[in-house]
Amino acid sequence: MPVTLVEVAARAGVSPATVSRVLNGNYPVAESTRQRVQQAVRELDYVVNAHARALLHSTSGIVGVVLNDASDPFFAGIARGIQGAAAETSRLSVICNSEGDPEQEFAFLELLRGHRADAVILVGAAPEDPEYLAEATARAKGMLSHGTRLVLCGRPAPGEDAPGAVVEIDNAGGSAAITRHLLDLGHRRIAYITGPDGRTTTTSRLAGFRSALAEAGVELAPDLVVHGDFSREAGRAGVERLLAADADFTAVLAANDLVAAGAVHALRAAGRRVPDDVSVAGYDDLPTAVDVWPNLTTVHVPLEEIGRKAVELAFGPSDQDSVVTVPTALVPRESTAAPAAG
Amino acid sequence: MPVTLVEVAARAGVSPATVSRVLNGNYPVAESTRQRVQQAVRELDYVVNAHARALLHSTSGIVGVVLNDASDPFFAGIARGIQGAAAETSRLSVICNSEGDPEQEFAFLELLRGHRADAVILVGAAPEDPEYLAEATARAKGMLSHGTRLVLCGRPAPGEDAPGAVVEIDNAGGSAAITRHLLDLGHRRIAYITGPDGRTTTTSRLAGFRSALAEAGVELAPDLVVHGDFSREAGRAGVERLLAADADFTAVLAANDLVAAGAVHALRAAGRRVPDDVSVAGYDDLPTAVDVWPNLTTVHVPLEEIGRKAVELAFGPSDQDSVVTVPTALVPRESTAAPAAG
DNA sequence: CTGTTAGCGCCTTCAA
DNA sequence: TTGAAGGCGCTAACAG
């Protein structure tokens, strides 16, 4: 149904090759001929078939992005950066929501490979399951050997020998920094609501928290760590569990800002004032951190920049695999304060 | 670099045609042959070249989504629905952020046409500029005549004769409903912070507000309508302008929840309690509506469902262009209450 | 400067 | 049940 180059050629009274040359502009064509061709292109409303072109070049101009859920503000931020950087080089970014399901993730990888994506960017925490790791590494090798660049984004490289570039977030560092912030305010009994179990991000953020406590010589009561995921609901449930267990804490550090938002709610519902009675801190500095009242103290993660960096690595000149670690920064706001005396 | 079907054929000791038949499964092949072919496919880690296939079928399996900004929760919600529905039919969704710029929007349309997208879904409010309308209508006709389905989502059809399917949001209706909610609580001096000027969504939400007031016989002071966009900042600035002008109001209705969140902030900063001194209401029921304190009274818009509906229209059996209007629903929460006496 | 030719990877007749 | 041949739309050689 769409117009083809041959039809344009016929209309302009030239050969297909000439039309192609006008379109691509990498070749001398007489001005008058060019005019006629462009005229015909406009009249027929012709657009080159990207597939036919991809067949020749074995490059498609598409960037695959595989993430848990693009409507989650964390992923949305990164995806935005990727999309922007890709668009600047006339590349199309294809977003695939894996819902955190490895099977779906692999299925999308396959689809993208079929479309000969120039690069695939895997965003977000990875399962720590060794079986997954093995499979992922194998897939990664497959993609690379078939000419698709692979970038891991927000997750560490699956192993020493695993190929591909990596944009890591300094999760442990940021987590330690915000923990020290709470310690500096005078908190000693800090509860922690984790992310989903068995994910790299969860582990490293928790590790940062523990290490900062250890460094300060503060012991962590085991009942102060409650498991959750990255949702508001987890924050609410986490605080409710802490309160039900009558746990003794003056601050809550949450795996991310959504969890922190949920925690603030639950605390308020239980009649505890934030930060007067309990301080709450989050992570990621999502846009919603300033919707929460009091505004969340959190750790800024430059999401959009991470996305751009990933594209840069994907198409950068460097042929060797590189690892970039993006720094994080403490953002003190109103949800944290010194603990009440006593 | 990637493996081709011919190589698989060679490895399996059969002809390319046979491999193709095994892959597509629409044709009888001897069981033993099938086995050998599948073996070869696995060994070589072969994936069909989607471009070569697209060349034959003139269908690509991709759905283009053009929106302002996928990291905006409104668009993110719709995009999520689209992506889910598309994935269920093995289609890839390509997200393009136009940043609200018509030129970029058209550029993406061009790109998507080049990729022979099976359908293009245009999401979000459209400029009301007649020049834009004309251009958009022309483009739409072009796409359709070249075999790409077009669905407008969250914007009205550009005109009577404009082609394509439409998923409309009942903006005027929802806006009228929430206005009545405020009226029922006893508010008479309601300020309104609008969306960006000259956009269909802005206009229809404002119209709903006005019509509900008119219906109730309440006159609207012109200084109570302040212009903004769909951001938190606009909400903040809007309230500050109202306060600076010493405007007389007991409630603020915002164009969406982000604006409402900003409004709540500014009111609190000015020492006005919500809802005791001033009620605030939003629109869209974005996830962040419950992060705001007090939780926002708003109008629920089924974003994900809208996305799914759009895909349905795009690939549904119906050949005629259809218009679906998605209903909205009032969600009363804590940010609205009866005005203080006096 | 322009036209002709061949082929990218695959699928679909048509024959065998 | 399988193979051979042609062509989808385009571009990169190679002539002219």
Image (cartoon, coloured by chain):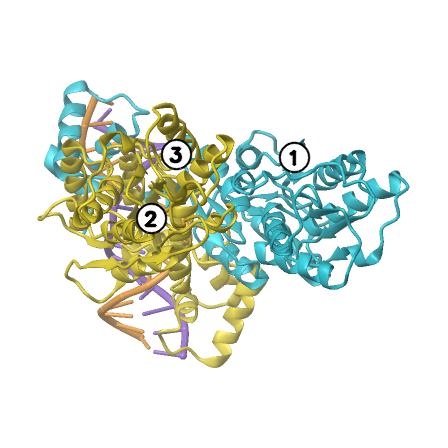
Chain colours: A cyan, B yellow, C orange, D purple
Which of the labelled discs sits on residue B245, or is there none?
none
For the residue marked with disc 2, what is the amino acid? Gly
**Three-letter code, disc 3:** Ser
Residue B251 horizontal/vertical position (percent): 36, 41
Chain containing the residue with disc 1 = A
A210 vs B330: above or below: above
Q: Which mark is residue B64?
A: 2
**Element class at badge 2:** strand
Q: Within 10 angstroms of label 2, few (less than 14), some, or many (20 or more) residues? A: many
- Give the distance between the C-alpha atoms of the residues marked 3 and 2, in whole angstroms: 15 Å
Q: Quadrant of residue A33?
A: top left
Give the SS element for disc 3: loop
Q: Which mark is residue A320?
A: 1
Question: Looking at the image, is mark 3 or mark 1 nearer the viewer?
Answer: 3
Of the numbered discs 3 and 1, the one sitting upstream in the chain is: 3
Specify the quadrant that holds the C terminus of chain A: top right
Residue B7 seen anywhere in this rendered image of the structure: yes
Residue at x 34% of width, y 34% of height: B229
Amino acid under disc 1: Gln
